[in-house]
Image (cartoon, rainbow, N blue to C red):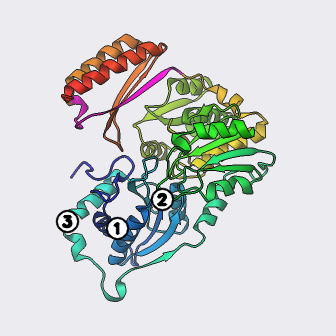
């Protein structure tokens, strides 16, 4: 097996209680994770399990924990907590693995499973491949624990408090948020408890939205997917900043004091330029994906740095950062990885870094975000009846070639399949928005013809 069949760009994901997100597979996945995490150990593996607020989280949490215990592992349950909190707990508690049960920004009926290694980083492709191999082998059935070797599960009672302390420590000790008014939308998700407390304990006045989860309202008309609600509240309450998180709080969208949206590209621009000035951006390089706007590249180059692009997915951003020793990277969608503080995207930590700049420079975020002069960008996602390799879609490839020829060096085209949904993603950048829309329309039609839809 050389290609992952179960794992996508961000773990396993799908509708809950439908393959692969069933309790039966989750139990077996727990056994496989315990098997991999326990190799080379003279003791039982210790594994942290966290989740968001989805109703199906109870079902999957118990199934995975049962699988781990069946292999003799020790389970540490944190309850609802952000994805980056699980990564941090895994490393700080010297656990052998961390598991997050969350489908991030997806609707509540979906769920997902992603895995962190003992260092707090997401598992590399080869270890996910090994887990998939075990799922299909008889090795797990022959290696179960019996008698006194069967594992046990326990609660981490202070998991939320540990994360709050960690997040606050990423904010400069000589600064406070006294006098700041912040609107925080936790998307009725994993950060519904911790996010408002982090900002409040640093001195801010906090207006909370999306902090009343009921198991079914995660991401529903709120959070990073619907920042317009935060924008309205920012204007209504005359707040200094709006913070919109997604369901597992590993990414964010900011809203400035004028009610305008600030995406990951703008945050990366304003933070990276200051890190360049302060000589804190290792090798003068920012890491972003192929989706980031050309304006970001221009802004970083203008400040004396360079932009390294990776495939879409924060795991690939982090892999490039680790491989080359870089300290900052992220995605346009709001995944922001400050490697000096975290091993994965963290919406709360990202917002604190921006707030630190605002407080230190005493400037509104709308002014700070002005360092990014954005190139017009048009995106289109089309749902198709089948997923076919792009090289086997000749009509689409022809339309893409014609589009790239029309744009020349003044723009670019990106075509990719979504890593988490059955959709084809099309992106065009260039100086003329109307031309971009026309080109994407032609490419979308070509893709439909390729698949007979």
Tell me the residue that label 1 is attached to: 30
Report x, y in % for residue 232. Answer: 65, 37
Report x, y in % for residue 121. Answer: 46, 55
Binning the other alpha carbons within 10 Å of mark 3 as few (below 14), some (14 to 19) or many (20 upward) gives: few
Q: Which mark is residue 137?
A: 3
Q: Looking at the image, can residue 340 be seen?
A: no
Please identify the quarter of the rendering in which residue 451 is found. Answer: top left
**Left or right: 170, with 346 as reference point:** right
Residue 376 covered by magenta stretch: yes
Q: Secondary structure at mark 3?
A: loop
Seen as rendered, the residue at the extreme bottom is 147
Earlier sequence position, callout 2 versus callout 1: 1
Tell me the residue that label 2 is attached to: 215
What separation in Å lies between label 2 and label 1 (alpha carbons)?
23 Å
- Residue in the image at 49% along x and 36% along y: 288
Residue 285 covered by magenta stretch: no
Earlier sequence position, callout 1 versus callout 3: 1
Tag 1 and tag 3, C-beta contact below 8 Å: no
Binning the other alpha carbons within 10 Å of mark 1 as few (below 14), some (14 to 19) or many (20 upward) gives: many
In the rendered view, tell whether residue 368 sits above or below residue 131: above
In the rendered view, tell whether residue 157 sits above or below residue 192: below
Foreground: 269 or 185? Answer: 185
Earlier sequence position, callout 2 versus callout 3: 3
What separation in Å lies between label 1 and label 3 (alpha carbons)?
14 Å
**Which of pointers 2 and 3 indicates the residue nearer the eye?**
2
- Residue range of the region highlighted in magenta in the rendering: 375-391
Foreground: 275 or 433? Answer: 433
In what quadrant of the picture does the C terminus appear?
A: top left
């Amino acid at each position: 097996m050389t290609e992952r069949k179960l794992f996508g760009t961000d773990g396993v994901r799908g509708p809950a209680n439908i393959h692969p997100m069933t309790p039966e597979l989750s139990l077996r996945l727990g056994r496989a994770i315990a098997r991999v995490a326990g190799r080379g150990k003279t003791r039982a593996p210790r594994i942290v399990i966290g989740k968001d607020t989805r109703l199906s989280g109870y079902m999957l949490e118990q199934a995975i924990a049962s699988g781990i215990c069946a292999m003799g592992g020790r389970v540490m349950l944190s309850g609802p907590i952000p994805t980056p909190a699980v990564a941090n707990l895994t490393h700080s508690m010297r656990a052998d693995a961390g598991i997050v049960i969350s489908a991030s920004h997806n609707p509540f009926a979906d769920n997902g499973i992603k895995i962190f290694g003992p260092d707090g980083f997401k598992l590399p492709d080869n270890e996910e491949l090994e887990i998939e191999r075990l799922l299909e082998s008889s090795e797990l059935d022959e290696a179960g624990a019996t008698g006194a070797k069967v594992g046990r599960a326990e609660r981490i009672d202070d998991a939320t408090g540990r994360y709050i302390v960690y997040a606050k420590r990423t904010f400069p000790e000589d600064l406070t948020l006294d006098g700041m008014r912040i609107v925080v939308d936790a998307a009725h998700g994993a950060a519904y408890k911790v996010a408002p407390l982090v900002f409040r304990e640093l001195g801010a006045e906090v207006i909370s939205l999306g902090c009343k989860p009921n198991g079914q309202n995660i991401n529903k008309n709120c959070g990073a997917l619907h920042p317009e609600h935060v924008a309205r509240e920012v204007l209504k309450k005359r707040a200094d900043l709006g913070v919109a998180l997604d369901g597992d709080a590993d990414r964010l969208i900011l809203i400035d004091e004028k009610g305008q949206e600030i995406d990951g590209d703008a945050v990366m621009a304003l933070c990276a330029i200051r890190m360049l000035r302060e000589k804190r951006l290792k090798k003068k390089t920012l890491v972003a994906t192929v989706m980031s706007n050309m304006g970001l590249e221009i802004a970083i180059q203008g400040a004396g740095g360079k932009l390294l692009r990776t495939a879409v997915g924060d795991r690939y951003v982090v892999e490039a950062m680790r491989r080359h020793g870089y300290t900052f990277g992220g995605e346009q969608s709001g995944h922001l990885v400050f490697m000096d503080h975290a091993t994965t995207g963290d919406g709360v930590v990202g917002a604190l870094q921006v707030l630190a700049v605002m407080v230190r420079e005493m400037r509104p975020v709308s002014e700070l975000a002005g360092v990014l002069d954005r190139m017009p960008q048009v995106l289109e996602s089309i749902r198709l009846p089948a997923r076919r390799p792009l090289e086997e879609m000749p009509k689409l490839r022809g339309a893409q070639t014609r589009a790239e020829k029309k744009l020349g060096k003044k723009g670019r085209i990106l075509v990719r399949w979504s890593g988490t949904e059955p959709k084809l993603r099309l992106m065009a950048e260039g100086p003329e928005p109307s031309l971009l829309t026309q080109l994407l329309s032609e490419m979308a039609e070509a893709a439909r013809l390729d698949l007979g839809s």
